[in-house]
Amino acid sequence: MMEGAVKSAFEIGTARAAAGETSVGVLKVAVAMDAREVTIPVGIVHGARPGPVVLVEGGLHGIEIATVEICRLLKERIVPANLAGTLVLAPQVNPWAFLASSRFTPHDSLDMNRVFPGAEGGTLTHQVARVVTRELLNRADVVIDCHSCNPPSLHFTIVGEEGNAETQRRSVELAKAFGYPVVCANTAYSGTLSGYCLEQGKPTITPEFVFSRRFDRTSVETGVTGVLNVLKHLNMLDGAIEPLDVAGAFGDVLAYRSIGATNGGFCFLEQECGVSVKAGDTLAVLRDFWGRETERILAPQDGIVIAYPLQGNQAAGSGDKVAYLAYRMD
Ligand SMILES: [Zn+2]
């Protein structure tokens, strides 16, 4: 638990909130080559009563901006006098990627969600991740790590496979409380923010909103309600958990896998997200300029298509992700 979470003030960067107060400020994460300090925005809603520290962060991938609106609305709506514990808001933790409208940090072409816990003396992305780890992750008891897929995609929440059984159990409970359908990752990428937090024993969930680059009304509204649901689940706020009304939702906790391309081409989607498919069904067809089929992406097993996570244009080269398939765990 956070040391002396309530009663004493909570400070991050220039934000400082006494118990029962809300404060916003900035946290220095690096210095640019013209000697200007580069900062990220931080907000603190510091409850009047004791309780856990929950961090909501987003924007590791610079095009995934839903967290900006979600954090702004959470700061407006939560009255700190009614809160037990502390909510920390960090809506945009990778400012260079955002300024470049890119998923990656332009200076070193790195994906910030592959470098945690970061490194002093590493390249820019490592150094920013190090500050995020020290000032935000290590001070939180629970982490809500916000990301987005472009459509077509369901709204869903991922629980990573790292951490012990108790951390996993608590994370799945938080993900269910949030309210989107829940999928557990079966293959870990190294260096993810969520993986680091889970390994530290912090319950962590990764909601995937719909639309990069845009403020999607459904994502913002359900994202705010989902965070409030988590706070209620943790007894930090009073009130009943509100179910989220999102398309294609399923009740069971499923596993999911990513299915990628081997041959490249323009990508034509053959399924709606949320539908059940059988092993061998076509998920997508890749074609060359003149329509010649270069590859057929098949479902490797029965499951539900939850997203077509194409990261750029509607096309995929060797190794690029084409579809996410959720399936029942044995
Ligand atoms: Zn992301």
Image (cartoon, grey):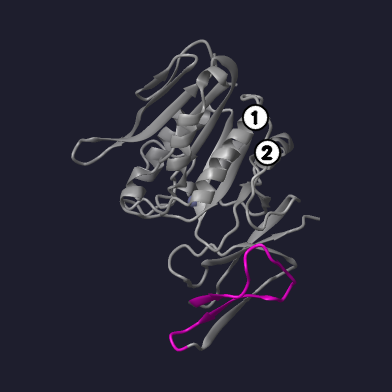
Taking the magenta stretch, the answer to whether it contains residue 276 is yes
- Disc tally is 2
Residue at the spot 66% in from the left edge and 38% down from the top edge: 242
Across and down, in percent, residue 251 comes to 74, 50
Helix, strand or loop under label 1: helix
Task: Describe residue 328's horizontal placement relative to residue 24 as left or right.
Answer: right
> Quadrant where the N terminus lies?
top right
- The residue where tag 1 is placed is 232
Report the amino acid beneath label 1: Lys
Whether residue 264 is visible here, answered yes or no, is no
Residue at image position (60%, 41%) is 205
In the rendered view, does 16 fall on the left or right side of 228? Answer: left
The quarter holding residue 120 reads: top left
User: Is residue 28 visible to us here?
Assistant: yes
The quadrant the C terminus occupies is bottom right
Q: What residue sits right under mark 2 in the picture? A: 177
- The stretch in magenta equals 266-290
Q: In the rendered image of this protein, does residue 19 appear above or below residue 312?
A: above
Q: Secondary structure at mark 2?
A: helix
Query: Residue 78 in the image: x percent, y percent?
Result: 52, 27
- In 3D space, how far apart are the residues under numbered discs 2 and 1 (Cα atoms)? 9 Å
Residue 232 lies in what quarter of the image? top right
Left/right of residue 16 with respect to residue 161 in the rendered view: left
Mark 2: few, some, or many residues within 10 Å (few <14, many ≥20)?
many
For image coordinates 39% across by 53% down, the residue present is 104
User: Which callout, 2 or 1, points at the residue further toward the start of the chain?
Assistant: 2
Residue 258 x, y percent position in the rendering: 61, 62
Q: Is residue 207 magenta?
A: no
